[in-house]
Amino acid sequence: DGGSPFPFTVQGLVDAARDILPRPHFDYIAGGAGRERTVVANEDAFARWGLNYRILRDGTGCDPSCTVLGTPMSVPVMLAPAGVADLAHPGAERAAARAAADAGVVQVLSSATSTSLEEVAAAAPRGRRWFQFAWPDDEKLARSLVERAENAGYTALVLQGDCHVAGWRTRELDSGFFPFRHGHGIGNYVSDPRFRELAGIGARPVPGGAALEPAEVPAAAATWNRLYTRPALRPGDLALLRSWTELPVVVKGVCRPDEAALLVDAGADGLVVSNHGGRQLDSGTAALDCLPGVVEAVAGRLPVLFDSGVRTGTDVLIALALGASAVMIGRPWLYGLAVGGQDGVAHVLRCLESEFTGALALTGHRGPGTLSPADLTPVPAPT
Ligand code: FNR
């Protein structure tokens, strides 16, 4: 009775977030590159697959849990790394960490957070966490971030491979709102002694203290902008990363089978098929259409994860049937955060888990491990 305070439809969630957030914040989250054809294509691609359902089955005891790279998950859904999530809600990453921990879901923390990775870990000590590593263009800073993540209990690194240039993001250009210039999303950096040295902002905090004085913002933002990524990053650099850490390394942003094969040979432990939610390249191929080719090239040698366009429990099922081990969601958790903070993220995760578990049973499975392309029928293109 009384219903939920939060919407259950994808569109309802988007509309509620748009109503609540200042327009430039909503546009930063919702927007994509160029005309946003990749954003649209990512979601539309799921409509080209139909799920085959089975009848007269025992639907009780369906268990949606799985384990990926040694990390147990209550459901094969993870929170994708999203920088500057505090645009959606204050204390964003900590709220998401608590919601993820309660749901038994992995939070992949962005490098570009407003709260330091240590503080996020401390907010949900029993949570499962991976760290998305944007390789900075300074080796000491790179090593420091990796070491801090390992010390704070992050159990895998997700190397961002697709941000060697900034996306042409038209909504941001229109609004003129660039969050990093205002000091959003650099908490991990300003709490790092090496970063502070590079920015010339003094050696004040130790890791964990992310307070940034307003007067320090211009120097910190300019330094971040200069060093955030290393344009010269190549598959061969995985060996260097390996020499710094024992953590498994997952490469995010893979769309091509030839690059997937290269990364397997270069020693990656996992891949994420992703086009960054359509935020980098307009007119890009839908991420889902890239998944089967990458899965084929990898040939079971390591887990393939997927993101970009996943909105519902049945989308999760389709991606898994095409060979993904688990999926990540980006915008949906940010919209949940906008409409209800921690409770809103919990709501989004509950919806995905319920719909996914029900759909597993309706397609005749007792868990995600048995999904295969045999569960799918391609929907013919309209003539
Ligand atoms: C992102 N994404 C992202 N990825 C990453 O590796 N590091 C980051 O800091 C960010 N930041 C970020 C901010 C915002 C506002 C969004 C929406 C996305 C990309 C993210 O991890 C993921 O690839 C996409 O969001 C997946 O697509 P959907 O689920 O949003 O369609």
Image: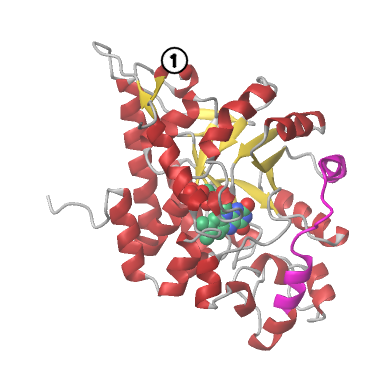
Could you tell whether 44 is left or right of 194 in the image? left
x then y, percent, for residue 278? 54, 51
Could you tell whether 367 is left or right of 52 in the image? right
What residue lies at 49% left-to-right and 28% top-to-bottom?
320
- As drawn, the residue found furthest toward the bottom would be 215
What residue lies at 41% left-to-right and 73% top-to-bottom?
23
Residue 235 within the segment the image draws in magenta: yes
What residue lies at 62% left-to-right and 38% top-to-bottom?
272
> Camera-side residue: 143 or 325?
325
Range shown magenta: 220-244
Q: Quadrant of the C terminus?
A: top left
Indicate how the structure is coloured in the image: secondary structure
> Camera-side residue: 333 or 44?
44
Q: Is residue 295 above or below residue 76?
A: above
Could you tell whether 251 is left or right of 7 in the image? right
Dot 1 beta carbon under 8 Å from ligand 1: no
Residue 192 within the segment the image draws in magenta: no
- As drawn, the residue found furthest toward the front would be 383
What residue lies at 47% left-to-right and 44% top-to-bottom?
41
User: In which quadrant of the rendered view does residue 121 lie?
Assistant: bottom right
Numbered disc 1: secondary structure: helix
Mark 1 residue type: Ala
Q: Mark yes or no: residue 71 visible.
A: no
Could you tell whether 345 is left or right of 112 in the image? left
x then y, percent, for residue 106? 54, 43
x then y, percent, for residue 32? 52, 58
Q: Which residue is mark 1?
A: 374
Q: Residues within 10 Å of mark 1 (few under 14, many from 20)?
A: few
- As drawn, the residue found furthest toward the top would be 56
Dominant secondary structure of the magenta stretch? Answer: helix
